[in-house]
Image (cartoon, helix red, strand yellow):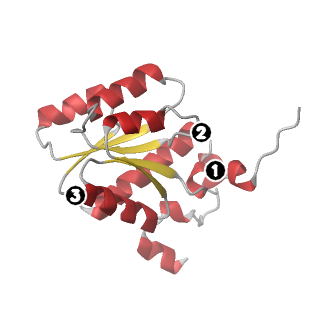
Amino acid sequence: EIYTLSLHDALPICLKKMRILAVERNPVFRAMLKTMLTKWGYEPVEARSGIEAWDILEREDAPKLLILEWMLPGMDGLEICRRLRKDRPSSYTYVLMLTARTSSQELLEAMEAGCDDYLTKPFNAHELRVRVVAGVRLLSAIAGEIPRVLPASPTPSYPSCFLSHSDRKST
């Protein structure tokens, strides 16, 4: 049996237009996340409830990076994290919790449930972007793609997903 890969399939994660699942019950925040992710070069996938998000995450082509609200109808963000870590241990999904919950106890609860990062609302768009980029870097490393992505030359030319907007202008 012969398998063929498209050029897109052969690219490292950070060079692809990564799909990111944005789970947010508020339509204004959801639209804002979609706009930001698109502007930053990602392909947003949207869900408005925990049940809808879980349905997307159960698909074979599920996004590997998840921006997740805590308080969701149907299934909350913590339950989604717990299920991801329990039911899908062989396929890593990076989870960034984006929530209005601000106490240190809530942060600990989210991290213990399986979140990788935690950002409170209202949030700074630049901070969200660098946290998303950190998630992409981690997923690239897990996939064993960092050596192919980061050249070993003395003055490396990093892929644009690792550069700030101002750095891209100078390269």
Q: Is residue 6 left or right of residue 169?
A: right
- Amino acid found under the numbered disc labelled 3: Phe
CA gap, disc 3 to disc 1?
29 Å
Q: Residue at x 62, y 54 (%)?
A: 149
Query: Which mark is drawn over residue 12?
Result: 1
Residue sticking out furthest to the bottom: 170
Q: Residue at x 33, y 61 (%)?
A: 31
Residue sticking out furthest to the top: 86
Instruction: Determine the image quadrant of residue 32.
Output: bottom left
Q: Position of residue 155 (x, y in %)?
A: 59, 67
Q: Nearer the viewer, residue 90 or 140?
A: 90
Q: Is residue 156 left or right of residue 24?
A: right
Q: Nearer the viewer, residue 146 or 31?
A: 31
Residue under label 2, please give it.
143
Q: Secondary structure at mark 1?
A: loop
Badge 1 crowding class, 10 Å Cα cut-off, few under 14, some 14 to 19, many 20 or more, is: some
N-term mark: 3 or 1: 1
- Amino acid found under the numbered disc labelled 1: Pro
Please count the marks in the image: 3
Q: Are marks 2 and 1 in contact (CB under 8 Å)?
A: yes
CA gap, disc 3 to disc 2?
29 Å
Viewer-nearest of discs 3 and 1: 3
Q: Is residue 87 left or right of residue 119?
A: right
N-term mark: 2 or 1: 1
**Depicted 15 relative to depicted 87: above or below:** below
